[in-house]
Image (cartoon, coloured by chain):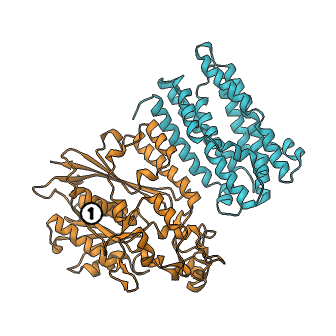
Amino acid sequence: MNGHGVPDVLRRLAIVFTEFEGRLEATPLIRKLTRGRFGLQDYQVFLVNLRQQVKDGAAWMSRAASNVDEEHLELRSILMRHAVAEHRDFRLLESDYVATGGALADIREAEKNVGSEALSAWMFHQASQPNPFGLLGAMWIIEGLGSIKAAEWGALVRDRLKLSDDAVRFLLYHGKNDTEHIGAFENMLELVLPDAAVAARIVKTAQVTARLYALQIEEIAT
Amino acid sequence: MTRLLDAFITGAGAFLPGPPVPSDEMENYLGRIGGRDSPLGRRALRWSGVRTRHYAIRPGAGPTHSNAEMCAKAVSAALEDAGLERSQLSFLAAATTQGDFLVPGHAAAVHGALGGGPLEIASFQSVCGSSLMAAKSAWLAVRTREHAAAAACAGEFSSRWFQPTFYEGTALVDAKGRLQAEADYLRFTLSDGAGAVVMEPRPRPGTLGLKVEFIDLVSLAHQYDPCMWAGATKEARGDAFGSWSHAGPPAAHATGAMALLQDFDLLKRVIRAWIGVYLRKVDEGRIRPAAIDHLLCHYSARSLREEIVALLDRTNGMIPEEKWFSNLSTVGNVGAASIWIMLAEFLRSGRLRPGQKVLCIVPESGRAFVGFMQLEATA
């Protein structure tokens, strides 16, 4: 199917996401988690590695909003609201880390890993373009992680490590509103589609974001 | 280069042992772990929607048929349906999850039970998807002119390994005598039977032709761990050296490694992976949902979760539920045999019209595998 309407783009994005999930499934860190060989130290390293890139999320989204022109004010509003809603999430992640016994300074001062560097650079570069609609593809991947993967990982981490909910809040808190997430995303796509070039850009941006996100997880040394 | 021939399904047959068994009698056939009713059974049944199924076992009286015998009966029924004699069959591909023996292959056992003259045979062992692996082999055998009449069969005798001896005294049963859900769930899900199809390079004269347009098989085992397996504990299933054959039979049994097990958490992810493979087929134009007149899916529409149906709807990937044909609720989930048992009943239902397309989908949770077969009815 060669269409570039909302259902076509949504279909390609769903394919990119499921293939991304398969890639994540085969990373050493997630293998440990699903095979029951995940320890507290693995969880702490996971949080430290995630935090640096999560902190950037609202920042690139704000930058993207500032590059949306006046023809697309509704999309700009959505991006700004999103940025506001998420810009403190990394604090939640920090408090989870502290609740597992980690030192706040350790998670705050840690460097981005190689994958996080690549992912962040890519996001800010995209967000700096005029009308960076491709980033809807990036949002699909990152929001999909939040609404689908985070809850699964959070429940596995909590159950395997016998942690209380207050040490897994970042992962568990994101794992809600699955069906709503697709509906809201569909509405966003309708603001910029149908358009062949935009459709292609959204899918390509999702592919690159998924690959770099998986790289970030692959780079977590455990 | 010589062009490949078309291949047609000219006969389909099924064999279901014994009477239909209603849900409240299942444990009379399967036995009760530690003599107690399963706490999980009712929930598993509600989820699968199966009302009756068949077992090749009589309560308290042992087996009635072997897996191979059931397959041989299904092949005979398919040959009968095609109007062929056994002597005209020259190729037999047989599929199963676990045959009657560890060695040799299932096709040899089916040939032994079927009798007749020499045959070329091929054995396929996996889970539900092994049916289409065998079908692809038969299809290519006809298309390449290697054989003028080829059969693909699949059989399951699941109730054997659902007997209490597979679980009692193993780590799968806790101190209170309760069987782990990973094992118990499958006892209420899978049942016995066999099915078969016959393929030839031309339709059976005087009937609606059923051309096999494609058989596509996709494994994602490079990314996913085993999701439904036997021969290892849940912890050891990703490690080939942790399998039963390294521990030795008595030690493996004690850990519960001999039982058939399912990982429910992983299954949710594997379902999304199947959907991804399907949507890729749709996106590439290989499958056109709007052009499908009948869908035979070895998975019930009602057990797909709401968000999956929403996703299929919103991506133009859904085939409307009124086009789904299934007999899962009356014949049970017969693993690899299900798709042929479903196809045989569908072909007898008189629903198929010339020019219509039939899509068969066989997802296999074994290790993230899914197969597709598309048929076209020719006048």
Relative to A181, does residue A43 appear above or below in the rendering? Answer: below
Q: Position of residue B368 (x, y in %)?
A: 50, 58
In this view, the residue in front, B325 or A30, is B325
Relative to B27, does residue B319 appear above or below in the rendering? Answer: above
Colour in which chain A is drawn: cyan
* Image quarter (top left, top right, bottom left or bottom right) of the N terminus of chain A: top left
Label 1 amino acid? Answer: Ala
Could you tell me which residue is drawn at 62 percent across and 15 percent down? A69
Quadrant location of residue B202?
bottom left
Residue position marked by numbered label 1 in the rendering: B141
Specify whether B325 is left or right of A27: left
Q: Position of residue B288 (x, y in %)?
A: 35, 41
Q: Position of residue A219 (x, y in %)?
A: 71, 49
Relative to A71, does residue A137 appear above or below in the rendering? Answer: below
Quadrant location of residue A94?
top right
Quadrant location of residue A43?
bottom right
The chain carrying label 1 is B
Relative to A72, does residue B367 appear above or below in the rendering? Answer: below
Specify whether B349 is left or right of B268: left
Colour in which chain B is drawn: orange
In this view, the residue in front, B230 or B202, is B230
- Whether residue A25 is visible here, answered yes or no, is yes
Q: Position of residue B198 (x, y in %)?
A: 23, 64
Could you tell me which residue is drawn at 16 percent across and 75 percent down? B87
